[in-house]
Amino acid sequence: MPFGRQWTDNRDLRREIRTTGTGITNDELTGDLEDELACSVCYTILLTAMTMACAHRICESCADSLQTQSCPECRAAFGSLGVDEETRQRVGEVPAKCGQCGSFQGSVKDVLKHKEKECLSQTVYCRWRGCGDTMARGLLGPHEDVCDNKKVTCHCGYKTILVELDRHLATECATLPIRCPLDCGTNVERAKVAVHITQECQRKVTCCSVPGCGFVGRVPDLAEHKEGSASRHVKLLELYNTRLKICLAEGKIKRSDAALVYGRVKAIIFTVPQLKRKITEGRTTFTSPSCKNIHDGEWKVSLQKEGYRWYLCLCLVSRASPLHLKVMFLLQSPGPDCGEDHAITLDGTVEAKENWRYGAPVPFGQLEEYSAHDDRLTVKVLLQEVSASVDM
């Protein structure tokens, strides 16, 4: 299971842009400030005007810092402070300019709105949750693109934050192409490395399959070895065959001494577009193009009608020698919400020979069901090598 900080679409979206605080200083006013619009303590503009019983006004910040409940100007006592809405409205109409960017001018109300929503020089917080960095609004986009807390989705679908993506790619990501550990030069998805180095890699170490040979080497060396040892291999196989017959004749071999050995799996994809329309028009045979380099042979897949039944068939077109296989036809589900694939397996082990067909019946109802989405039938044919071992 991947570890680290994950996120979901519903919970961890970016926040709204928040400023670090907006206000107006006296230096940003473009005209003289009337005394009654200035705080009697700090002498700044009364953006947050509060009034006392004596009618003197102070700003909210100075009011919070008062040590006693008496007017700092006339010392008159007061019970509570009230919000001075009229003064606040008057202050909002005072001419001013933006001291951050230096270019915007208007009323105090307009300048405050400009700083809150538009000013590229106004200091704002990063919107990614977990980040407390501040910067000018104009630099927000570039920062958020590289922010450690940026929400990102790996190409494998795993959701994390940018600072943890490298760790995920380095240790977990199943679909990240990595270099073959045996240094064959191939890049393989991490999840498929084990299959690659055991079944596909040209630098894997393997043994000669001829009983009694004993050669061990890499794949290219094995091919060269087989070419140079053909006559010796024939003698070893004759010896092995004789020994096998003697053991059978003497009753030394039991059924439990033999076992099937399953090898590489290869796949052929066969697609029939407009299946129903073509069947309605009277078509009874559909054949795939030739598929080469599948278990060192050339193959074709067909869907054909014989009598009243439909059959899926596999044909070995060309191969130097027969091959023993397990064969499965998979009718591919037409969509993620349309159920699972349907498997049709040929009984037992097939000895595939050139120009022989190996088929299985398929109900016409299933052909209709698995082509219902867009009148397209897709069949995946799985071919697995089969051999046998005998313990003598």
Image (cartoon, grey):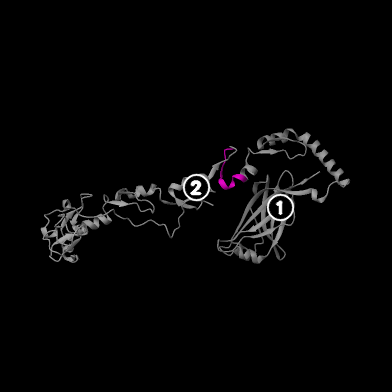
Assess disc 2: are there few (<14), some (14-19) or many (≥20) residues with their C-alpha within 10 Å of its C-alpha: many
Callout 2 amino acid? His
Q: Quadrant of residue 286?
A: bottom right
Callout 1 amino acid? Lys
Identify the residue at horizontal 59%, vertical 47% (top origin). 192
The Cα–Cα distance between marks 1 and 2, rounded to whole angstroms, is 38 Å
Point out the residue furthest to the right here: 250
| 193 in the magenta segment | yes
Residue 24 x %, y %: 20, 54
Against 176, residue 14 (above or below) is below
Quarter holding the C terminus? top right
- In the rendered image, which residue does mark 1 sit on? 326
Looking at the rendered structure, which numbered label has been put on residue 4?
A: none
| 207 in the magenta segment | no
Residues drawn in magenta: 184-194
Residue 61 x %, y %: 21, 57
- Nearest the viewer among 33 and 84 is 84
Looking at the rendered structure, which numbered label has been put on residue 168?
A: 2
- Nearest the viewer among 140 and 132 is 132
- Nearest the viewer among 141 and 61 is 61
Q: Which circle's residue, 1 or 2, is located before the other in the chain? A: 2
Q: Secondary structure at mark 1?
A: strand
Q: Secondary structure at mark 2?
A: helix
Left or right: residue 271 compared with residue 93: right
